[in-house]
């Protein structure tokens, strides 16, 4: 089968990595996979497709393909065009952000009717976030495929015996939705503790007060930029605490990977986490934008190695079921059902 795999762009994110891994799986299964992006500018994921030997199309078009998968809500314009020419899977990862984008682009709503299959990683998106947009569609077209991650292929954690700092790491592009300013302000309030904070991801914007706080504390903050997947995993493994203070998430790969590496998560208390992540059980949680609570939680973990170990172990048990094999099998079933109809 000839499959067209469409990203919005080639930046590093959980969704672009997930589609890349899915493309690799499909190629191993005997399919021909071509990658492309709605915004065809260069980027790390484009380089990775080329490094792995995938052909790339400069512009998403239906010619020569049997099926396509459009990744994220930002590919709605491609769904509207391509779904009329071939079976199309629309893979949505966004919660509140997705609603905002639909309100800004009302013409995208028609993509729900056009897509042959709509894939969500969690039921909350189907039952709550997008309920009004998929009402009346055939239930067989709405699929739940939880994200899956491979076992981390890196060596056991080696702790520098001379290290005295507690390492806090956060993974994700630095822009308002991820709320990294909350983390920077919280870490800046921990001057009485030996902590260091590393932010991994493309820098888009930070408020002026955050630059001032970081400049006043040389060595306490590291803006690592976009790193390779292997380097990101190594940095998470070397850390003591993983923090994701986002204002909106769904099922972030960075969280699954940090948990697999037994890093205790500190998270904002988002409704999408219900049923998986619970404060005091496998993570610590704070209300969105509560820098005071975030500061308290980081201080608690920084001074309590036993709590870090307990939450990290519980987090690892939590994500044990999010296997890459199960993810591939579920997506294969979506692909088979869609192409069988034709």
Image (cartoon, rainbow, N blue to C red):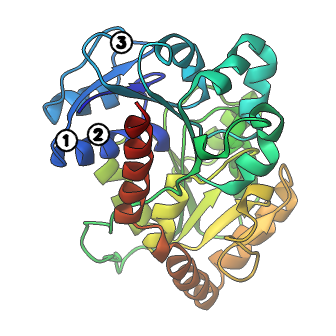
User: Which residue has dot 2 on it?
Assistant: 23
Residue at (65%, 32%) from the top-left corner?
A: 175
Nearer to us of marks 1 and 3 is 3
User: On the picture, is 91 further left or further right than 246?
Assistant: left
- Quadrant of the image containing the C terminus: top left
Q: Where residue 231 sits: x, y (%)? A: 31, 51
User: On the picture, is 270 further left or further right than 123?
Assistant: right
- Quadrant of the image containing the N terminus: top left
| Near-viewer residue (153 or 192) | 153
Q: Where residue 87 sits: x, y (%)? A: 43, 26
Q: Where residue 68 sits: x, y (%)? A: 39, 27
Residue at (70%, 51%) from the top-left corner?
A: 183
Contact flag, marks 3 and 2 (Cβ < 8 Å):
no
Residue at (38%, 12%) from the top-left corner?
A: 60
Contact flag, marks 2 and 1 (Cβ < 8 Å):
yes
Sequence-first tag of 3 and 2: 2
Residue 270 can be seen in this image: no
User: Which residue has dot 1 on it?
Assistant: 27
User: Which residue has dot 3 on it?
Assistant: 62
Q: Is residue 16 above or below residue 162?
A: above
Secondary structure, mark 2, is helix
Q: Where residue 3 sits: x, y (%)? A: 29, 29
* Circle 1 residues within 10 Å: few <14, some 14–19, many ≥20: some
| Near-viewer residue (165 or 27) | 27
* Circle 3 residues within 10 Å: few <14, some 14–19, many ≥20: some
């Amino acid at each position: 089968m000839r499959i067209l795999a469409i990203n919005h762009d080639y930046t590093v994110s959980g969704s672009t990595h997930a589609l890349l891994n899915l493309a690799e799986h499909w190629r191993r299964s005997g399919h021909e996979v071509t990658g492309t992006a709605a915004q065809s500018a260069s980027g790390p994921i484009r380089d990775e497709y080329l490094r792995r030997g995938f052909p790339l199309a400069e512009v998403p078009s239906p010619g020569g393909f049997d099926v396509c998968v459009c990744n994220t809500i930002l590919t709605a314009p491609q769904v509207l065009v391509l779904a009329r020419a071939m079976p199309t899977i629309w893979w949505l990862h966004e919660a509140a952000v997705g609603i905002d984008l639909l309100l800004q682009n009302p013409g995208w709503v028609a993509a729900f009717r056009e897509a042959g299959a709509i894939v969500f990683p969690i039921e909350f998106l189907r039952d709550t976030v997008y309920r009004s947009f998929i009402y009346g569609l055939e239930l067989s077209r709405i699929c739940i495929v939880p994200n899956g991650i491979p076992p981390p292929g890196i060596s056991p954690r080696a702790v520098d015996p001379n290290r005295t700092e507690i390492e806090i790491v956060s993974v994700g592009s630095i822009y308002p939705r991820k709320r990294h300013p909350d983390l920077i302000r919280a870490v800046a309030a921990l001057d009485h503790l030996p902590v260091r904070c590393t932010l991994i991801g493309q820098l888009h914007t930070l408020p002026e007060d955050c630059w001032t706080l970081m400049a006043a504390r040389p060595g306490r903050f590291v803006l690592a930029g976009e790193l390779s997947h292997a380097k990101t995993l190594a940095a998470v493994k070397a850390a003591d605490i993983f923090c994701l203070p986002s204002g909106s998430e769904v099922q972030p790969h960075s969280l699954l990977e940090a948990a697999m590496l037994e890093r205790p998560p500190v998270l904002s208390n988002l409704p999408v986490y219900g049923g998986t992540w619970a404060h005091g059980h496998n993570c610590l949680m704070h209300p969105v934008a509560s820098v005071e609570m975030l500061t308290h939680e980081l201080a608690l973990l920084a001074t309590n190695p036993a709590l870090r170990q307990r939450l990290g172990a519980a987090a690892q048990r939590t994500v044990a079921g999010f296997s890459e094999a199960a993810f591939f099998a579920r997506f294969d079933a979506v692909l088979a059902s869609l192409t069988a109809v034709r």
